[in-house]
Image (cartoon, grey):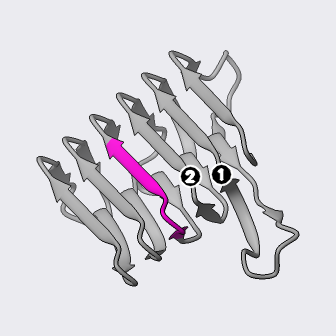
Amino acid sequence: IEAGSLVIQENSFVRNAGTFSFDLAMFFYYADHSSTEVGNVVLFDAAVDILNNSGSEINDAAITLGDRVYNSTLNINGNEFTFENPATAQEGVFIYGPIDAFSTVSISNNTITDCGVGIEVHTDVTNHSACTIADNSIINFRQRGALVDRTIQNSSLTMNGNTLTGNGT
């Protein structure tokens, strides 16, 4: 998404009969930006709100951003996701690329149940960006409740008010 906005609100991601559940509820793939300084991006000068959605019987990940969030605002708030099999489930919220260039990401008031990792920012919060992970409930996670790789270059990370309950494996 470049220079635009997107709201994904009050949707239900559920299996409709059948034997198999589905892998991903929401997946944002990346594109190669024309500027060599930027590289691959999922969001560029964008505003995205993912609000009050629910999902059940998910196999892999509920919300995945496949690469860089660049000079953008991302709010993931009030969602509830439950996974099919806690032994094989992956991430509730997974941001693969950096949060970069004055971006703001807020992941708050979500409930993620029976996952491998509740919330993961796989690489940096960098270049004057901010990430807030607050008031989430991560229930019965197998590996990590919440993980952010690192913050660099005048960036910030705030984690508060989260309830993280592992499953003991």
Does the CB distance between marks 2 and 1 fall below 8 Å?
yes
Q: Secondary structure at mark 1?
A: loop
Q: Secondary structure at mark 2?
A: loop
Span colored in magenta? 99-107
Vertical order, 54 against 151 (above or below): above
Q: Residue at x 75, y 70 (%)?
A: 40
The amino acid sitting under disc 2 is Ser
Q: Which residue is mark 1?
A: 45
Q: Residues within 10 Å of mark 1 (few under 14, many from 20)?
A: some
The amino acid sitting under disc 1 is Asp
> Where in the figure is residue 168, as x and y percent of width and height?
18, 62
Instruction: Looking at the picture, tell me which residue is in the foreground, 20 or 92.
Output: 92
In this picture, residue 51 sits left or right of residue 67: left
Separation (CA) of disc 2 from disc 1: 5 Å
* Residue 126, quarter of picture: bottom left
SS majority, magenta: strand
Q: Residues within 10 Å of mark 2 (few under 14, many from 20)?
A: many
> Where in the figure is residue 22, as x and y percent of width and height?
66, 37
Q: Residue at x 33, y 68 (%)?
A: 147
Q: Is residue 66 magenta?
A: no
> Where in the figure is residue 71, as x and y percent of width and height?
58, 59
Instruction: Looking at the picture, tell me which residue is in the foreground, 143 or 120.
Output: 120
Which of the two discs, 2 and 1, labels the residue nearer the N terminus?
1
Q: Which residue is mark 2?
A: 72
In this picture, residue 71 sits left or right of residue 152: right
The quadrant in which the C terminus is found is: bottom left
Q: Residue at x 35, y 59 (%)?
A: 131
Q: Is residue 61 visible?
A: no
In this picture, residue 115 sits left or right of residue 101: left
